[in-house]
Image (tube, rainbow, N blue to C red):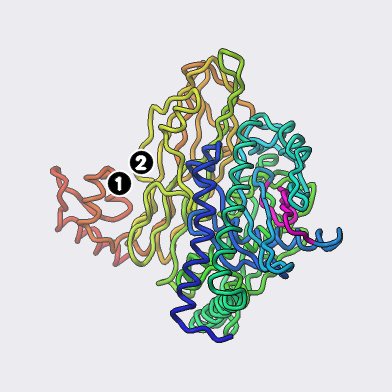
């Protein structure tokens, strides 16, 4: 069926609105601040046969949308083995090896039936506050198997032909330190799917199943053709990029993420076979998560291509089965966020070599998953889990974003007012971190400094971070950003973790503090070509120190903060001649 451009545009907008409304429904009803405030969740519409992504919401996490295609396919396959999908079924699971990410991310999958046949699937995923395991909040940097990270639920029916299975919810609740939060988030996801089904049926009634189906086919075809066209514009050949994780939390040894990117006419090959093998600690990821991370990276670079499965049609993946990028149970995967951020970095670094105008420098590269847990004076359990921001990479169009969230998502950093209201903590510092952005013609965005004071009697602290040893890289001659730094206070002063970016079971008492200094983003272009007035402005704003203005940018400032033009020209000319 041929669709006119106006109808296609209207249907595209209406379908995206359905996913966006599901996002909004969950964000407004979730009990957990990580979903309600930080928007660590996502919704999408998926193909009835293949499970491929058809439409994604714009407010949630793109990494979830990419992985959910594998999750929906897992449901389709399991249902086929058990007699098929029925109207009123809803599946729930968090299996990170079968279309998942890590155990905190629970997925609900619901078929939309039309005239007795599945037209499409709707899916919801959200990061639940606590799902058991050894560490409250579930980011356990010392895990050596998934059983130490939380409860693992394979695809099971939450609704069986419309009948709610309370026994499944009872099992889930019994394995959480915060069952009330779990109950609220679960019901928020159920409501989001019910709304999505209602909106989808209304759209199909208005435009017919055939017309909407033709639209979905056309949108995927257009995304694939646009990707092919943009790949054809890139120079043929192979480029390589490497980056490293600090360690796996068990052995203090770096882990390599290596990419050989090849352009062959209108196809792209992403070869990760030189990457490190699977490791003992929880920075492993599944193959589906690797592919989803690359989907996110490519969408950053080719931003005008529609967000659906067509993006990956001209892309080939080569990933060794024994790699840390393609593990199976029971290898731990709790810190998947750190590894996918490094995957995005190496894609950015590779693209910078062949299409510098389309490239961007590496962002800060860690979510710094921080958990504090204890008991209030009345005996009530509390668990604070949160992630924190940093600087984004600079690009051809300008400086990087200061204090943004990780580029795996459109999530937001939880506001300090919400965290202070929900937990017995006080933020004594929440500020931009000077000199943390990578120097360049366009400067990398600044990271942040957070200082947290405990207001309750005592608490245990857990941190799962990265970029403590290997700084976010600049591109096209830009410099690296500052590295990550974490400190915790004890009776004898502040200490740093032996593993730099990861630690478990630190005990702190009332009044003691935690201090987190997050990385900035890498720079873009030669820093000595940056406009001296822009450097002086950075110094006035406190983004760059006078010392760094001179050492990194070769800009000399007068006592009043203005640019000393003669001294600056002289310094830059001497360095250019060397």
Q: Nearer the viewer, residue 270 or 481?
A: 270
Q: Is residue 280 above or below residue 285?
A: above
Name the residue rendered at 58%, 74% in the picture: 208
- Give the residue number, with chain letter if any, for mark 2: 432
Residue at mark 1: 544
Question: Residue 461: image x %, image y %?
Answer: 58, 28
Label 1, label 2: how many angstroms apart (C-alpha)?
A: 11 Å
Q: Position of residue 323 (x, y in %)?
A: 73, 58
Q: Tell me what residue is drawn at x 78 percent, y 53 percent.
A: 328
Element under disc 2: strand
Contact (Cβ within 8 Å) of mark 1 with mark 2: no
- Please state which of the two labelled residues, at mark 1 or mark 2, is closer to the viewer: 2
Q: Residues within 10 Å of mark 1 (few under 14, many from 20)?
A: many
Q: Quadrant of the C terminus?
A: bottom left
**Mark 1 / mark 2, whichever is N-terminal:** 2
Task: Quadrant for the N terminus, please.
Answer: bottom right
Q: Looking at the picture, how far across and down is residue 78, in whole percent? A: 81, 59
Locate residue 417, reporting x and y percent: 40, 32
Predominant SS of the magenta segment:
loop
Magenta segment range? 85-102
Residue 17 part of the magenta-drawn span: no
**Residue pictured at 60% horizontal, 22% vertical:** 374
* SS at badge 1: loop
Q: Is residue 356 left or right of residue 176?
A: left
| Vertical position of residue 425 compared to residue 266: above or below | above
Does residue 216 appear left or right of residue 276 in this picture?
A: left
Mark 2 closeness class: few <14, some 14–19, many ≥20 residues within 10 Å: many
Tell me, yes or no, if residue 467 can be seen here. Answer: no
Q: Is residue 89 magenta?
A: yes
Q: Specify whether residue 495 is in view.
A: yes
Could you say which disc has been placed on residue 370 in the image?
Answer: none
């Amino acid at each position: 069926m041929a669709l006119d451009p106006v109808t296609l545009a209207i249907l595209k907008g209406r379908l995206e609105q359905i996913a966006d409304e599901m996002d909004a429904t969950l964000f407004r009803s979730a009990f957990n601040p990580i979903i309600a405030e930080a928007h660590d969740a996502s919704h999408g519409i998926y193909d009835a046969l293949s499970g491929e992504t058809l439409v994604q919401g714009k407010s949630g996490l793109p990494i979830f949308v990419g992985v959910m295609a594998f999750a929906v396919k897992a449901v389709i396959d399991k249902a086929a083995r058990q007699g098929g999908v029925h109207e009123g079924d809803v599946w729930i699971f968090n299996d990170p090896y079968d279309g998942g990410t890590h155990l905190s991310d629970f997925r609900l999958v619901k078929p939309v039936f039309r005239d007795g046949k599945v037209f499409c699937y709707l899916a919801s995923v959200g990061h639940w506050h606590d799902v058991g395991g050894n560490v409250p909040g579930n980011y356990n940097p010392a895990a050596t198997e998934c059983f130490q990270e939380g409860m693992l639920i394979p695809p099971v029916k939450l609704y069986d032909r419309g009948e709610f299975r309370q026994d499944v919810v009872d099992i889930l609740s019994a394995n959480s330190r915060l069952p009330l939060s779990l109950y609220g988030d679960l019901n928020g996801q159920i409501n989001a799917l019910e709304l999505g089904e209602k909106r989808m049926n209304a759209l199909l009634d208005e435009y017919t199943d055939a017309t909407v189906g033709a639209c979905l086919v056309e949108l995927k075809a257009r995304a694939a053709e646009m990707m092919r066209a943009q790949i054809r514009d890139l120079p043929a050949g192979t480029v390589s990029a490497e980056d490293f994780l600090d360690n796996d939390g068990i052995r203090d040894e770096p882990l390599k993420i290596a990419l050989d990117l090849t352009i062959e006419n209108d196809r792209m090959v992403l070869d990760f076979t030189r990457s490190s093998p699977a490791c003992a600690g929880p920075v492993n990821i599944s193959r589906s998560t690797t592919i989803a991370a690359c989907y996110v990276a490519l969408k950053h670079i080719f931003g005008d291509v529609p967000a659906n499965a067509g993006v990956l049609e001209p892309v080939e993946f080569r990933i060794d089965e024994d790699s840390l990028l393609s593990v199976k149970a029971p290898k731990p995967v709790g810190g998947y966020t750190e590894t996918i951020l490094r995957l995005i970095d190496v894609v950015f670094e590779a693209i910078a070599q062949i299409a510098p105008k389309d490239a961007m420098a590496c962002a800060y590269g860690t979510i710094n998953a921080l958990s504090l847990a204890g008991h209030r004076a009345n005996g009530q359990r509390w668990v604070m889990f949160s992630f924190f921001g940093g600087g984004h990479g600079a690009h051809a169009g300008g400086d990087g974003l200061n204090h943004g969230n990780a580029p795996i998502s459109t999530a937001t950093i939880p506001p300090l007012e919400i965290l202070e209201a929900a937990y017995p903590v006080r933020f004594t510092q929440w500020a931009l971190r000077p000199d943390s952005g990578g120097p360049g013609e366009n400067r990398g965005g600044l990271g942040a400094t957070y200082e947290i004071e405990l207001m309750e009697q005592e608490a245990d602290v857990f941190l799962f971070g990265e970029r403590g040893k290997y700084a976010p890289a600049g591109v096209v001659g830009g410099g690296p950003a500052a590295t990550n730094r974490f400190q915790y206070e004890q009776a004898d002063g502040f200490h740093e973790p032996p593993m730099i970016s990861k630690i478990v079971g630190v005990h702190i008492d009332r009044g003691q503090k935690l201090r987190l200094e997050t990385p900035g983003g890498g720079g873009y272009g030669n820093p000595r070509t940056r406009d001296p007035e822009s450097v002086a402005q950075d110094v006035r704003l406190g983004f760059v120190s006078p010392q760094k203005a001179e050492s990194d940018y070769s800009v000399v400032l007068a006592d009043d903060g203005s640019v000393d033009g003669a001294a600056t020209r002289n310094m830059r000319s001497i360095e250019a001649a060397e």
